[in-house]
Structures are given as C-alpha cells and as structure tokens.
Amino acid sequence: MDFLVGWIAIVPSYATPLLLASLGLIVCERAGILNLGAEGLMAVGAMTGAVAVLSGFDPWAALAAGAAAGTALALLFGIATVVMRADHTLSGLAVVAIGLGVTGVVGRPYMQKTFPGIANFGELFGIERSSALGRILAVQDPVTLAMPVLVALLWWWLMRSGSGLRLRAVGENPAAADVAGIDVQVAQFGAVLVSGLLCGLAGAYLCVATSHVWVEGMVAARGWVAVALVIFARWNPARALVGALVFGSADALVPRLQAIGADIPVYLAMMLPYLLTLAVLVASAMAGRASGEPSFLGRVYLRQDKH
C-alpha cells in the first residue's frame, strides 16, 4: 500500500513537463507546423531556470525565465519555417542541436548545484501526511494542480472558439484559410511561439520544481516522448492529459522501485517510457491519416499555392 500511495503521489510531477510540452506541440501542429524541437526547447528552459534561481531570482521568476528562453529559441524556429519556409523536420532537428549545444556551454558553471524550488502544498498549507490522501496532496505543487484547468481552457479554445477554429483551418487547408482572410503566417508564427513558451516552461519545471538541480542532459529524451504523446493524443489536449498520466506513471515507476530496493534490472525498467513511445509511433503509422493528424502538417505553404 505504501508503494502504491508513494507512486500515485509522484506521478503528477512526472506527467506535468510531458503535458506542458505536448500542449505546446499540439498548438503548433494544429497550425500545420511540425515541431520536432521540443527536446532542445526543454533543455534551454531547464538550464535557464537553474541559472535564474542560482543568480538569486525567485523560483517562480525562474519558471518564467525558462519559458521566455524557450520562446526565444522558438523564434528562430519560426523564422526558419514560417518566414524562410525551411523544411520543418530539418529545422526542428537543428533546434534540438542548438538547444543541447547552448546548454552544454552556457550552463556548465551551474551544473550540480542544488537550489530551492517552488513550495508544495505540504509546505504552503501544512497538510498532514498521516493519511494516504494527505501524503498525495502534500507533495503536489500549484503547477500540477493548474494542469487540468490549462487543458480545459486550451481544449475549449481550440475546439469551440472562433480563433481556435481559424488556427485549425490553417493546419488543415492554409490556402482556403488564406482565401477566407486569415493571415496564415501570423497564425503559424504565433503557434510556434506558444509551443516554445510551453516547452521552455516544461523544461524549467523539470529543473526548478522537481529536481532542484541542473545537470547536462537532464531532459533525457522527454521532448521526444512529448512528440509521441501528441500522436497518442491525436492532437487533442484532453487526450494529452490522459496520455501524460500514462507516460508519467511509467516514468515514475523507476524511482519508486529503487526506493523499495526491488530486485529488478533498473535499466530495463527505465526503458519502459521509451518502449511506450515506440509502441505509440508504430500504432500511429498503422492508423495513417485516420489518426486525426492535421492535413497540412509538416508541409511548406507558399502563398502562390492559393487557388
């Protein structure tokens, strides 16, 4: 029972960065821009968050700094894909390389230095940990509990609002959207920046809220898991919440098994989230277009294509 309660308690903190990144990618890809740069955007956000805290800023300001850093790197991606009309896949891979390279150089003096993170509900409200519910609630933080609200707002905006409908129209048929008077480039550029903001925040959360330390490579392929999570969610924010909890549960299993000294191959257990990712990609490939993928995803739109 202790194992189960401890596992449930830490799942939200493992799911939150995956959910934040996947929500950003959903917005971006709903506008037709394939964003494979989440790993680099999260890495920059994580490193910037650590640098901000170690430089004396409040942990909440560090989260904002990480989000801003992700947005700045996404700006380059937006210029490449939306303005210069570069290939989306190659541009995304370049963002990953830039993000990992920058963090390795700039963040080296800040490696392996612990710092205080954001307070959890146990510290804020003095929640007793004598019961199972108390143990679960005490370790949660305001960001994790804000996630369902963010998912609901984003789902409503994408599926029910006029501006969300226009964004989806750009991802499905930019030529028709252009004819209808929608500025395709502005919509796509805005979506790219939102993806950078949320991916940067995801990286900063991973560093500032859960780890309280920054080490090179700490994102550990979670950006790629977020890419698979978007496919798993069929570009739907509500499904992304469920998927993040599934992937987060698998990710959170390893430290719990280590904590109780379970006699299982740890490295085999660490493969579980990535095996899930591989399974999702295979299932998506078998589903084809029926998976809900935006029709113009990953394709470069030229205005003369309008007809």
Image (cartoon, rainbow, N blue to C red):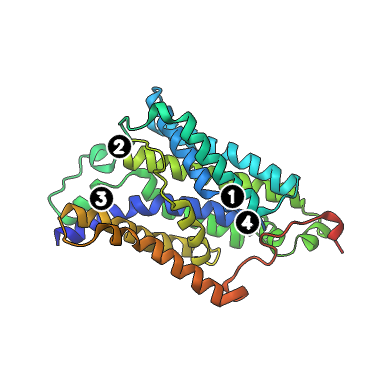
Query: Whole-Å distance between the Cαs marked 3 and 4?
Result: 37 Å
Mark identifier at residue 34? 4
- x, y (%) of residue 281? 50, 68
Q: Whole-Å distance between the Cαs marked 4 and 1? A: 11 Å
Please name the residue that numbered disc 1 is placed on: 93
CA gap, disc 2 and disc 3: 13 Å
Where is 28 relative to 239, above or below?
Answer: above
Under mark 1, the amino acid is Leu
Left or right of 171: which side holds 217?
left
In the displayed structure, 251 sits above or below 293; it is above
Identify which residue is drawn at 55% across, 46% down: 96
Cα separation, mark 1 vs mark 3, equals 39 Å
Lower sequence index among marks 2 and 4? 4
Say which element carries label 1.
helix
Q: Are marks 1 and 2 in contact (CB under 8 Å)?
A: no
Residue 93 visible here? yes
Q: Is mark 3 on a helix, strand or loop?
A: helix
Q: How far apart are marks 1 and 2 (CA)?
A: 35 Å
Name the residue tied to disc 3: 137
Q: Please, what secondary structure does the residue beneath circle 2 have?
A: loop
At numbered mark 4, what does the secondary structure look like: helix, strand or loop?
A: loop
Q: What amino acid type should be assigned to the residue bearing mark 4?
A: Leu
Judging by the rendered image, the residue that carries numbered circle 2 is: 119
Q: Say whether residue 177 is left or right of residue 61.
A: right
Quadrant of the image containing the N terminus = bottom left
Characterize the local packing of mark 4: few (<14), some (14-19) or many (20 or more) Cα atoms within 10 angstroms: many
- The picture places residue 225, in percent across and down from the top left corner, at 45, 57
Instruction: Give the residue type that dot 3 points to.
Output: Leu
Q: How far apart are marks 2 and 4 (CA)?
A: 35 Å
